[in-house]
Amino acid sequence: MKKIVIILVIVLIYALSVKAQTLIIKISEINNTKGQIRLAFFQSEADFANETPSFAKYIGKSKLKDGAITVKYSNIKKGKYGIALLDDEDCDGVMRYSFFVPREGFGFSNYKHKGMTKPKFKDFCFDYDGGDMTIDIEVRYVM
């Protein structure tokens, strides 16, 4: 009986000491509280070009403070990712355009977007090893 109690105590101590591995995404320069933020996780240039993310996450803006919000995910598998952000003000899931100019905010993982063309996947991708990692995304509004 003592052995079982000791084993259970050891397992419990180990379980409590294991820290969840977290991908932290810091989003800044959000200029409104309308709609939601959509994070599309791409794993290749082809997926990005075809606008077919491996998965997407949606973030409400209720915790927005000073134009910024931070989210944490502990269920992201190891791999190469590039995150494209859409400030989906009308919650329709797609970017709105006016004469080919984006009308909603957008951004990319660890990449400050300049110019009017889409970046290449290699410009904003990163290797996630499953450990703690912080990604910065600055939202850009053209209109």
Image (tube, grey):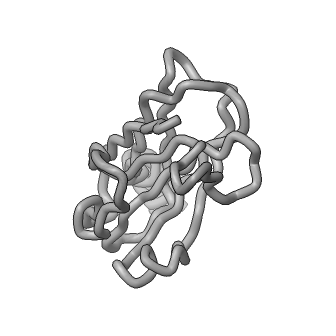
Q: Position of residue 38 (x, y in %)?
A: 60, 51
Residue in the foreground of this view, choosing between 108 and 135: 108
How many callouts does the rendering have?
A: 0
Dividing the picture into quadrants, the one containing residue 81 is bottom left
Q: Position of residue 131 (x, y in %)?
A: 30, 57
Residue in the foreground of this view, choosing between 82 and 105: 105
As drawn, the residue found furthest toward the top would be: 66
Query: Can you say whether 83 is above or below 142 in the image?
Result: below
* Residue 4 seen in render: no
| The N terminus, quarter of image | bottom right
Residue in the foreground of this view, choosing between 16 and 22: 22
As drawn, the residue found furthest toward the bottom would be: 46
Which residue lies at the image location 59% right of the left edge and 43% below the top edge?
103
Residue in the foreground of this view, choosing between 117 and 133: 117
* Residue 105 seen in render: yes
Which residue lies at the image location 35% right of the left edge and 78% below the top edge?
45
Query: Can you say whether 35 is above or below 74 in the image?
Result: above
Which residue lies at the image location 45% right of the left edge and 62% below the top edge?
3
Which residue lies at the image location 53% right of the left edge and 74% below the top edge?
51
As drawn, the residue found furthest toward the front would be: 99
